[in-house]
Amino acid sequence: ALTAIGGCLADAGFTGRNGGTPTACSAGSFKADTGPDSCQECPTNTSAGVIASDNLADCLADAGYSGYGINVTACSAGTYKASIGSAAPCLACPNHSSGPDASPSVSKCRCETGWEGVLQNALSVCSSINLCSRNEDDCSSNATCLHTGPGTHSCGCNAGFWGSGTSCASCPA
């Protein structure tokens, strides 16, 4: 049986009037059915990286989000996802760091108080800050600095001196 040109329908992934020349759905849109209907934009925080997409599932999560189609969620605080147009899961920020919801890059993760580092890739680390080894403590020149944890310390007066550690005086003779 022959079909008249007016009976030709645009395939899924294409739009156009019946019998006309179809146009492929652009990247970031899709059309699941045949016929003259318009292509639909991918849902918020997704994009289809292909033209002529015929399936909502081709709409993959943008950076900072995970999933595809209508099942897309923001990366939770302390996680990130850098890849665009991917259903890949969100990755944890490096140890001793966290970041806001929907972080699109590890660089959005920040080291916690008492820790420092430049977070540029998945191998980046936050290191404990030792104020004593940097001579950035508030201890008296007659005291010894003791590193007690990330970004914390205590001061103790040296032998022959007394005081708080931040202020030390000579012991009476």
Image (tube, grey):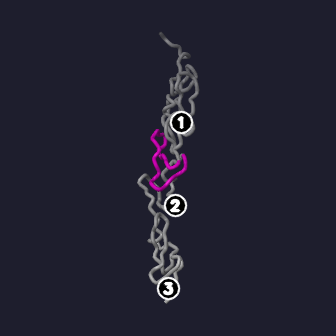
- In reply to whether residue 96 is colored magenta, the answer given is yes
Residue 32, percent from left and from top:
52, 26
Tell me the magenta residue range: 77-101
Residue 167, percent from left and from top:
54, 79
Query: In the image as oriented, which residue stretches furthest toward the top?
Result: 1
The numbered mark, 2 or 3, whose residue comes first in the sequence reads: 2
Q: 9 or 33: which is nearer to us?
A: 33
Residue that appears at 46% across and 67% down: 148
Secondary structure category for the residue under label 2: loop
Q: Would you call the spot at circle 1 few (<14 residues within 10 Å), some (14-19), or many (20 or more)?
A: many
Determine whether, in the image, residue 60 is placed left or right of residue 38: left
Q: CA distance from mark 1 to mark 3?
A: 77 Å
Residue 143, percent from left and from top:
48, 78
The residue labelled by disc 3 is 171
What numbered label is drawn on residue 113? 2
User: Looking at numbered disc 3 in the image, what kind of residue is underneath it?
Assistant: Cys
Residue that appears at 50% across and 39% down: 61
The numbered mark, 1 or 3, whose residue comes first in the sequence reads: 1
User: Looking at numbered disc 1 in the image, what kind of residue is underneath it?
Assistant: Gly
